[in-house]
Image (cartoon, rainbow, N blue to C red):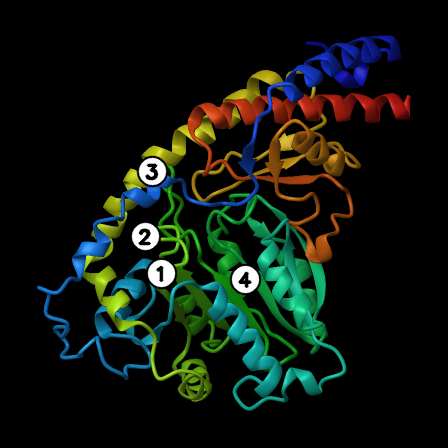
Amino acid sequence: MKSYKIMTREELQALLDELKKGFVDAKGKGLSLNMARGKPAATQLNMSMGLLDAFNSRVDPVTPSGIDTRNYGELIGIPEAQRLMADMMGAPYENVFVFGNASLPIMYDTISRSYTFGVNGSTPWCKLPKVKFLCPVPGYDRHFAITELFGIEMINIPMDENGPDMKLVEEYVKKDDAVKGIWCVPKYSNPAGITYSDDVVRAFASLKPAAEDFRIYWDNAYAVHDLYDEGDELLDIIGECEKAGNPDMVFEFCSTSKISFSGAGIAAMASSKKNLEWVKKTMAIQTIGYDKMNQYRHVLYFKNLDGIKSHMRKHADIMRPKFEAVLDCFDKELEGLEDLVAYTRPRGGYFISFNAIPGTAKKIVAMCKEAGVTLTGAGATFPYGKDPEDSNIRIAPSFPDVDEMRMAAEIFVLCVKIASLEKLLEEK
């Protein structure tokens, strides 16, 4: 098909009229498809049901390290779970604490702890005139919601195929001591699906912040979530920070929420011994210990990193056809719009990032909803829910089945075409 950009006004209008008829037909189907959040499908969750039998009344509740998982204590987690999560993150065992069911509460608590008590003896953020965070965009809406809740000013940092714009990051961090942190999803980033390059990771580790309490919030949510046998490799940020003489500069987070059960997994933080001792001081007031029976259940079921990777290859077999159904549809149906829209081809994670013609994302999302397809709200991938270009849309292919995903993608591209044509007609 001829590029939309070179069509005459009459050609654009004729095509728009034809596509609007298709939209009426789509609305008449009464569909209810959800591509809004990266929820695992039931088929993925079913794979972990054996976890419930891994720790039963016939299993000795005392771990090989001698801990009775039924009782109080072991604030930082059982050693067996520490080793499992350390291996998953590629971090040293002694640098890892194991917490509760998911990583989001750890991130929230880390911000709250810094805001209330200060970081490692620094001034509590609540006593400072201004606190700022750098936010690579498009990014994870729940990260932004945490910092917004605490009144922290958020600054957009553009991303490319290698990661955040490190020159801009370095400039902000070096010059402004009000900049206290940066949110990162370094592997298969949410939503773009890119993995930070080695150069970007080393640049992070070598930052020279004006603020002594500046920290990198390294949310390694998709550490083992490859879609293909040859997954992306991510450099170990903990090790690189130590090499660069900045051992205290990073908090790394991960969980099994999209490996075992969502909201019923185990989560961990990796950081320097100094940072972890600081965390431990307030943790000891907050809790006597997290669910050690659930930690041990995961250890018994997965056994080691090889067990997790074997499990995740089965996840990939479920997820990959859904991603490919969406991308095949985009490749086929967006002919004529190639020079106006763009989308990512992730090799792992849970999302596809789509950039529509500026000024059309909200309209596309609203039209999809009208036709029975629910998407993440336009703007959600930016701080304060404000995409300055009104362009980015996050697509989550995980929850519907392959046929539903294909139908949803077809409706999505129909809405993209209509919104694009209307925008181009406005401009002619």
The numbered mark, 2 or 1, whose residue comes first in the sequence reads: 1
The numbered mark, 3 or 4, whose residue comes first in the sequence reads: 3
Q: What distance separates the C-alpha of mark 4 from that of mark 1?
A: 19 Å
Q: Residue at x 76, y 25 (%)?
A: 420
Q: What distance separates the C-alpha of mark 3 from that of mark 1?
A: 25 Å
The numbered mark, 2 or 3, whose residue comes first in the sequence reads: 3
Cβ–Cβ under 8 Å for marks 4 and 1? no
- Which residue lies under the disc numbered 3? 43
Looking at the picture, which amino acid does disc 2 mark?
Ser
**For residue 348, above or below residue 29:** below
Q: What distance separates the C-alpha of mark 3 from that of mark 4?
A: 40 Å
Looking at the picture, which amino acid does disc 1 mark?
Met
Q: Secondary structure at mark 2?
A: loop
Looking at the picture, which amino acid does disc 3 mark?
Thr
The numbered mark, 4 or 2, whose residue comes first in the sequence reads: 4
The numbered mark, 3 or 1, whose residue comes first in the sequence reads: 3
Residue 89 - label:
1
Q: Residue at x 60, y 17 (%)?
A: 333
**For residue 269, above or below residue 45:** below
Q: Secondary structure at mark 3?
A: helix
For the residue carrying disc 4, how many other residues have a C-alpha within 10 Å: few (<14), some (14-19), or many (20+)?
Answer: some
Cβ–Cβ under 8 Å for marks 2 and 1? no
- Which residue lies under the disc numbered 4? 203
Q: Secondary structure at mark 1?
A: helix
